Image (cartoon, rainbow, N blue to C red):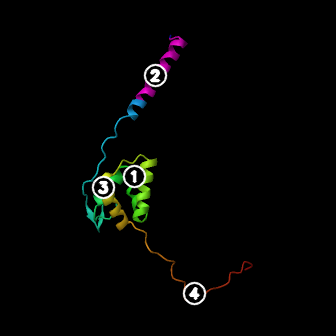
Amino acid sequence: MMSSTLRYTLLLLLLVAVAVGGYLLSDREPEPRPTEAKPSRIVDGLDADTGLIAEGDYLLVKGNCLACHSAKLVTQNRATREGWLEMIHWMQEKQGLWDLGEQEGPILDYLATYYAPEESGRRPPLGDIEWYILNPTD
């Protein structure tokens, strides 16, 4: 049977090894990220795998943005070029997104063109409605 001192020493050594290993791994250079994805089947103007509008530099967006999150995060948002740039900078500061380098411009162009804010107003007023009074005592 192992003495409790030996057990604690081994446990301490294991914890130190894990901490040192984690520290050493954190200093590694990040692995290169994909910059352009392979084309997939296009259906009704959309990339069948992602739902991205399959025009312009969509493969850059597919290769860079979808390496970390779902295409839904792109397609459900709308922003100006400045808004998309702010989102990218936030992801770089807070989420560890790599420097997009010279691809940042084409990615922003694509997002600002195909996922720009949409002009939408309220629905038209209801017309020709026959209203009736609800009587709670009936």
SS class of the residue under badge 2?
Answer: helix
Magenta part of the chain: 2-21
Residue wearing tag 1? 69
Residue wearing tag 3? 103
Q: Residues within 10 Å of mark 3 (few under 14, many from 20)?
A: some
Say whether disc 3 or disc 1 marks the residue closer to the N-terminus. Answer: 1
The reply to whether residue 15 is in sight is: yes
Residue contact between numbered discs 3 and 4, judged by CB atoms under 8 Å: no
- In the rendered image, residue 19 lying in the magenta stretch gets the answer yes
Residue contact between numbered discs 3 and 1, judged by CB atoms under 8 Å: no
Q: Residues within 10 Å of mark 1 (few under 14, many from 20)?
A: few
Judge depth for marks 3 and 1 and give the one in front.
Answer: 3
Residue wearing tag 4? 129
Per the model, the C-alpha gap separating discs 3 and 4 is 54 Å
Up the image or down, 70 lies above or below 119; here it is above
| Disc marking residue 108 | none
Residue wearing tag 2? 14
User: Residue sitting at 39 percent across and 64 percent down?
Assistant: 81
Per the model, the C-alpha gap separating discs 2 and 1 is 34 Å
